Image (cartoon, rainbow, N blue to C red):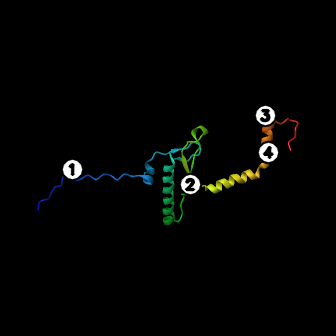
Amino acid sequence: MPRRIINTAMLPQRRPRRRSGASTITSHSRTICSLTGKLRYRDRHQAVDALNSARRQRAYELAHFGSSTREETRIYRCADSGEGGCGGFHATSIPCSVRRGAAAAVTLQTPKAVSAAIHIMARASGLLGVDEVAA
């Protein structure tokens, strides 16, 4: 029986599947923030995709290897470029509640230092005389 030759040009062409969301995160160009040294994501959507990807990778590594180095828990917006930041978004492993609690603890532990700084500024501005002793 003779072999039948198929002309592939006559077959319907299959369109390549368009990738979107977290599957395209590796194809995005990523830069490093000069302020934090972390990967910069251009918008919240890209940062959320990266965070979800890190969570999936962490679950995979825990299931197969028993440990993981991926610890990202949330995203945050960086300072604008005028303030030395990049204006993008970053992923971090520090939970939001820990960050706020640590800042509150520092403020509560140093009221004397804050008071001293206020008095120094008041003396320098002329609001408080050099001879005056503040209570």
**Amino acid type at mark 4:** Ser
Residue 132 versus residue 65 in the image, above or below: above
Q: How far across and down, in percent of the image, does residue 95 sit?
A: 61, 56
- The earlier-in-sequence mark between 4 and 2 is 2
- The earlier-in-sequence mark between 2 and 1 is 1
- The earlier-in-sequence mark between 4 and 3 is 4
Q: Nearer the viewer, residue 29 or 12?
A: 12
Dot 2 alpha-carbon crowd within 10 angstroms: few under 14, some 14 to 19, many 20 or more: some
Q: Which mark is residue 125?
A: 3
**Amino acid type at mark 1:** Ala
Q: Which mark is residue 91?
A: none
Q: Is residue 62 left or right of residue 9?
A: right
- Mark 1 lies on residue: 9
Q: Are marks 4 and 2 in contact (CB under 8 Å)?
A: no
Q: How far across and down, in percent of the image, does residue 128 sit?
A: 83, 36
- Residue in the picture at 70% in, 53% down: 104
Dot 4 alpha-carbon crowd within 10 angstroms: few under 14, some 14 to 19, many 20 or more: few
- Residue in the picture at 48% in, 62% down: 60
- Mark 2 lies on residue: 74
Q: How far across and down, in percent of the image, does residue 76 sit?
A: 57, 50
Dot 3 alpha-carbon crowd within 10 angstroms: few under 14, some 14 to 19, many 20 or more: few
- Residue in the picture at 80% in, 48% down: 112
State the SS at label 1: helix
- Mark 4 lies on residue: 115
Task: Name which quarter of the figure residue 6 lies in.
Answer: bottom left
State the SS at label 4: helix
